[in-house]
Amino acid sequence: MSYCVNCGVELEASLRECPLCHTPVINPRKAGRDFPPSPYPDSKGQVEVVKRKDLGILLSVVLSATSATCLLLNLLVFNRSLWSLLVIGICICLFVFTFPVVFYSKMPLAVALFADGAAVAVYLYMIAYLTPSTAWFWELGLPIVALVTLSTGIFVFLSRKVPFTILSGALCLFIEIPLFCAALELMIRRMILSPLRLTWSAVVLTVCVIIDVALITILVKKRLRNEVRRRLHF
């Protein structure tokens, strides 16, 4: 067994250079002779990347099989209630959520958001179908889903159409949060037949207004904006 003259690492007899420091291996007794073939492969292998189509097929098969087996189990064994609707609804939501990523990446964002909101609405309706009354779905569940979908769509639209930074994004977020909370409280009060007025959402609104005023001041004043960016490293 030989050793590297530079770093002293132990060498295999077939090596032409040190694997650690890449110093050429020269044996005076075997000068001019051919080295035995290296026991290590010369080419670097690479695992084949999974294609999006194959991933889509796997996802579709798994979700379809889950839905079908749960439905059959529900109909043939545990048939006191349609509990399989909950599993089928989750599978539908997962399929719709992953569709733009796995199946069609060129789908417009507005269409993807609408599809996500529709999938969640369908799942909530399945839950409502299993409950004694569907009033909560029409008066609270569906409006909340629509409100969240609309708020998300507005936020994404503004982030793409106007110069978007962390500060401007935070400003949009703290404008939408109190509006969402106020609308949520009013919907809950309308459902339970209470007077339409703001209580806890007014506190959220007050805090967010203060934050919005501070963010607007920072965005307007260039020196403040640069100082905040320098201190927060963005």
Image (cartoon, grey):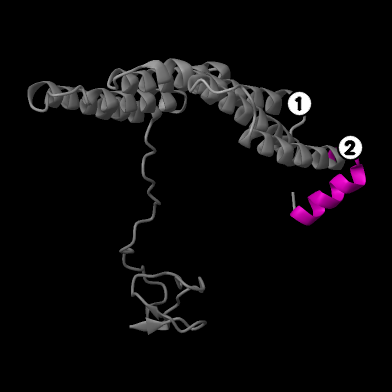
| 55 over 96 or under it: above or below | below
Left or right of 220 on screen, residue 232: left
Binning the other alpha carbons within 10 Å of mark 1 as few (below 14), some (14 to 19) or many (20 upward) gives few
Magenta residues: mostly which secondary structure? helix
Magenta stretch: residue 228 in it? yes
Residue, disc 2: 220
Pick whichever, 46 or 228, lies toward us: 228
Quarter of the image for residue 55 reads: top left
User: Which residues are drawn in magenta?
Assistant: 219-232
Secondary element at tag 1: loop
Residue 117 in view here: no
Residue name at image x 59 percent, y 22 percent: 195
Amino acid type at circle 1 is Val
Instruction: Pinpoint residue 228: horizontal percent, then vertical percent.
Output: 81, 50
How far is mark 2 from mark 1, CA to CA?
A: 15 Å
Residue lying at 51% horizontally and 20% vertically, measured from the top left: 193
Q: Nearer the viewer, residue 153 or 174?
A: 174
Is 148 on the left or on the right of 130, as rendered? Answer: right
Closest to the observer: 97 or 33? 97
Q: Is residue 229 left or right of residue 27?
A: right
**On the picture, is 56 further left or further right than 115?**
left
Q: Could you say whether the residue bearing mark 2 is in a helix, strand or loop?
A: helix
Label located before the other in sequence (2 or 1): 1
Q: Position of residue 130 (x, y in %)?
A: 27, 21
Q: Amino acid at mark 2?
A: Val
Query: Crowding near pointer 2: few (<14 within 10 Å), some, many (20+)?
Result: few
Residue located beneath label 1 in the image: 162
Can you name the residue that lies furthest to the left here? 76
* Residue for point 38% across, 55% down: 42
Q: Is residue 223 magenta?
A: yes
Which image quarter holds the N terminus?
A: bottom left
